[in-house]
Image (cartoon, rainbow, N blue to C red):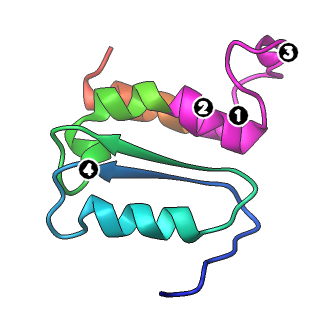
């Protein structure tokens, strides 16, 4: 068994549930063995390679609950979550992705 990967940054792995080139099981094992301040693993159903691009609506809906807490340390819906000082670079980038994907 390989040793664990240690990272000083948070991570979230988005994985297509039907990816045959990078099957979910080994990715999940890698995730489980890795160490990070916070980490997440999300399977996107009915997706293979490039799951975020094949199902941008699902990916963009997951970002506030999976990525934002890892980046900001604030969970949506928690006290203080509405005290966001304004649009960050990440929020602006994601807004552009949503506009360009055709997702409302």
Residue in the picture at 68% in, 55% down: 10
Secondary-structure class at tag 3: loop
Which residue carries the number 3 mark? 80
Which residue carries the number 4 mark? 16
In primary-sequence order, the first of circles 4 and 2 is 4
Secondary-structure class at tag 4: strand
Q: CA distance from mark 4 to mark 2?
A: 23 Å
Which label lies toward us, 4 or 3? 4
Q: Please identify the residue farthest to the front as the structure is shown.
A: 1
Q: Are the residues tagged 4 and 3 within 8 Å (C-beta)? A: no
Which residue carries the number 2 mark? 91
The answer to which quarter of the image holds residue 87 is: top right
Secondary-structure class at tag 2: helix
Q: Nearer the viewer, residue 14 or 55?
A: 14
Q: Are the residues tagged 1 and 2 within 8 Å (C-beta)? A: yes
Secondary-structure class at tag 1: loop
Q: Position of residue 102 (x, y in %)?
A: 25, 24
Which residue carries the number 1 mark? 88
Q: CA distance from mark 3 to mark 2?
A: 17 Å
Q: Are the residues tagged 3 and 1 within 8 Å (C-beta)? A: no
Residue 103 is labelled as none
Residue in the picture at 25% in, 68% down: 22
């Amino acid at each position: 068994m390989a040793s664990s990967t240690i990272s000083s940054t948070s991570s979230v792995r988005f994985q297509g549930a039907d990816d045959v080139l990078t099957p979910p099981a080994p990715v999940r094992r890698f995730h489980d063995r890795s160490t990070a301040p916070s980490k997440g693993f999300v399977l996107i159903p009915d997706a293979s390679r490039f799951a975020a691009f094949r199902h941008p609506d699902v990916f963009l809906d997951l970002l506030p609950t999976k990525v934002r807490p890892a980046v900001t340390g604030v969970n949506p819906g928690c006290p203080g979550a509405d005290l966001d000082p304004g649009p960050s670079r990440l929020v602006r980038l994601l807004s552009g992705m949503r506009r360009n994907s055709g997702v409302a």
